[in-house]
Amino acid sequence: MRYSDAIRSEQELEELLSTPSPALIEMMKRLDGDLMILGIAGKMGLTMGRRAARAIELAGVKKKVVGVSRFSKPADREKLEAWGIETIPCDLLDREQVRKLPRVANVVFMAGRKFGTDGSEELTWAMNTLVPGNVVEHFKASRIVAFSTGCVYPLVGPETGGCTEAVLPAPVGEYSQSCLGRERIFQHGAKAFGTKVLLFRLNYAIDLRYGVLHDIARQVWNNEPVTDSVGHFNVIWQGDANDAALRSLELAASPAAVLNVTGPETASLRSIAEQLGKLMGREVRYAHDGLGSGSCYLNNAAKMADLFGYPSVPLARMIRWQAEWFKNGGSSLGKPTHFEVNNGKF
C-alpha cells in the first residue's frame, strides 16, 4: 500500500485504519464461522470491526461480524451498522446477559478497565477478571483472542531489548495485577474447557487522535514541557495491531498461547519529541531533565514479526503523520495514554 505524507481528515484516517491486509483477506477465506468482537465500542474496536467486515467482503465469503458493547454512545452503534456489522447491546459484567449472546466460532475480547483504577480498584478487578470468567464460560467452544497488555511484564531498561513472551509476569500496581488476573482466567478456561485462546499483549497502539505519539505531540504543539518520567517505549500503528489481532485467531491454542504485539523499535522519548518539534516548528522543553527513567514497559515483538512480518507503517511515518495532524487542526479523543506512569497507579 502506498501512503500519503499526511492524513487530513477523520474519514481518511478511519479508511486507512480499516483497510485489511492481503494476508487478512486470505485468512478470512480459511477461517470457519462468524466473528464477534466484545467491547467493540472502545478506541480500537470500531475500526477493527470495519476492517474485519471489509476483509470478509473482499475474500468473497459469507460470515457475520457481530459487535457487542454497552453502546453508551448511540453514534458508535449507528456507525457500525452502516458498515454492515450487527450490533448487540450487552453489559458483560451481567452473567445472564452474556448467556443470551449467540455463540460464534471466533471471538475477539477487547473489554477491560484501566484509567480510574486508583481509588476504584474493585471495579477494575471486576471488569478485568469477572468479565473474562463470564466470557470464557459462555464461549468455551470458540477461538478467543483476548486483549492484554505488556504491563503484566516487569519494568525493564532499554538495553534489554524488551520482554519476550518467555519473561515471567511481574505486574506493578493493581491495574497490571488485574490484567494478569484476566490472563489467568482465560488460561484456566483454556485448560478446563479446552478453549483455544491467544493472549494478545499490546503496547501501545497509535491512532492520530490518541496514543503515545499524540500525547507527546500535543505537549510540543502547545509549548508545554514534555513529560519525561519514562524515557523509552514501543508503539505500533493501530491498523497493524488490529490486523494482527484478527489474524491471531488462527494462533489460538489450548493451553493458551501468548503473543507480544508492538513495533520493532525501542523508541526514545527525547528523540521523538525533538523530531516532532522540528516538524512542527516548536522548541521542545522537558518536565525534568529530558533523560527519563530507566524503568519502562517494553515489549519484544520479534515473534509477531516472524509470524506476520514487520508492521506496514514504520515509526518515522507515524511521527510525520502525527506532526501534520496537529498542524492541520486534527481532532483528539481526549484520552491520554498515561504511558509515562511506571509506578502502577492509573
Image (cartoon, rainbow, N blue to C red):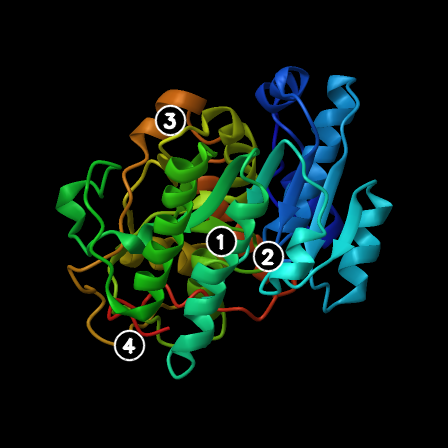
Question: Mark 4 vs mark 3: which is more N-terminal?
Answer: 4
Report if residue 220 is visible in the image. no
Mark 1 to mark 2: distance in Å?
19 Å
- Which of label 2 and label 4 is nearer to you? 2
Q: Nearer the viewer, residue 207 or 45?
A: 45
Q: Residue 53 placed where, x, y %? A: 74, 34
Label disc, if present, on residue 54 of the rendered structure: none
* C-alpha distance separating marks 1 and 4: 39 Å
Look at discs 1 and 4 and give the one toward the viewer.
1
- Badge 3 amino acid: Ala
Q: Secondary structure at mark 1?
A: helix
* In this view, the mark in front (1 or 2): 1
Q: Secondary structure at mark 3?
A: helix
Determine which residue is flagged by label 3. Answer: 305
Q: Pointer 4: what residue? A: 287
The answer to whether 202 is drawn above or below residue 170 in the figure is above
Answer with mark 3 or mark 1, whichever residue precedes in sequence: 1
Q: Is residue 245 above or below residue 10?
A: above
